[in-house]
């Protein structure tokens, strides 16, 4: 049952995003579009709440419970950036200016990579706090192996992302040469 809630909430997120952008540009309804965009984190919050209630009712913690925390943290940290990215592309599709691309070389690229990593760090911090909350609801760390395993994996991914993202600060990507 929980997997259906996860799939339903994830589908609802993308349907809301598409509907909001189509309402903005296709139907000229920017206020309704904004309301739908503001509802996006609520979908992930609903998913997290459903998972926490499931744990409070005695369900054995699974990776799916932890993924709800990951989704919510990621939605809060990356959501505004994702919406701006999609919005700029759809605006261009409907006659607006072309979207700006992220810098690909030099110090600007390195700064962009650092900002993206900082968003990842924010997502990890929010998700980590929520995983700890679910661990407490589930009865402590001795019952929450899958949650702790997910947190450990995400921490390793965060470290690798740090090394990758900050490598551009030490070794900036230069302009590509054509041969």
Image: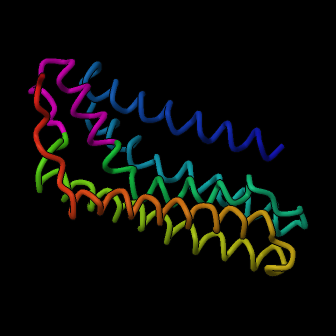
Which residue sits at x=81%, y=81%?
140
Nearer to the camera, 52 or 174 = 174
Residue 12 appears at what percent x and percent y?
57, 36
- Where is residue 169? Give x, y as percent: 21, 62
Q: Which residues are magenta?
A: 83-101
Q: Is residue 84 magenta?
A: yes
Q: Nearer the viewer, residue 111 or 2?
A: 111
Which quadrant of the view contains residue 18? Answer: top left
174 sits left or right of 152 in the view:
left
Q: Is residue 9 left or right of residue 176?
A: right
- 104 sits left or right of 86 in the view: left
Q: Position of residue 168 (x, y in %)?
A: 24, 57
Where residue 30 sits, quadrant-wise, is top left
* Residue 66 lies in the magenta-colored region: no
Q: Quadrant of the N terminus?
A: top right
Which residue is pictured at 82% across the width and 73% down the height?
138
Q: Quadrant of the C terminus?
A: top left
For residue 127, what is the image quadrant?
bottom right
Work out whether 110 lies above or below 151.
above
């Amino acid at each position: 049952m929980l997997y259906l809630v996860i799939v339903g909430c994830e589908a609802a997120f993308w349907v809301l995003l598409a509907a909001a952008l189509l309402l903005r540009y296709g139907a000229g309804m920017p206020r309704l579009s904004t309301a739908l965009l503001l509802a996006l984190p609520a979908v992930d919050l609903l998913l997290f709440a459903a998972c926490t209630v499931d744990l409070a009712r005695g369900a054995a913690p699974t990776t799916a419970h932890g993924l709800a925390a990951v989704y919510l943290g990621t939605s809060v940290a990356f959501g505004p950036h994702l919406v701006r990215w999609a919005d700029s592309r759809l605006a261009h599709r409907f006659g607006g200016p072309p979207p700006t691309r992220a810098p690909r070389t030099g110090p600007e690229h390195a700064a962009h990579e650092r900002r993206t990593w900082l968003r990842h760090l924010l997502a990890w911090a929010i998700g980590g706090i929520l995983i700890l909350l679910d661990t407490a609801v589930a009865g402590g760390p001795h019952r929450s192996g899958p949650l702790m395993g997910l947190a450990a994996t995400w921490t390793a991914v965060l470290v690798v992302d740090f090394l990758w993202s900050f490598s551009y600060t030490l070794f900036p990507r230069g302009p590509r040469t054509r041969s």
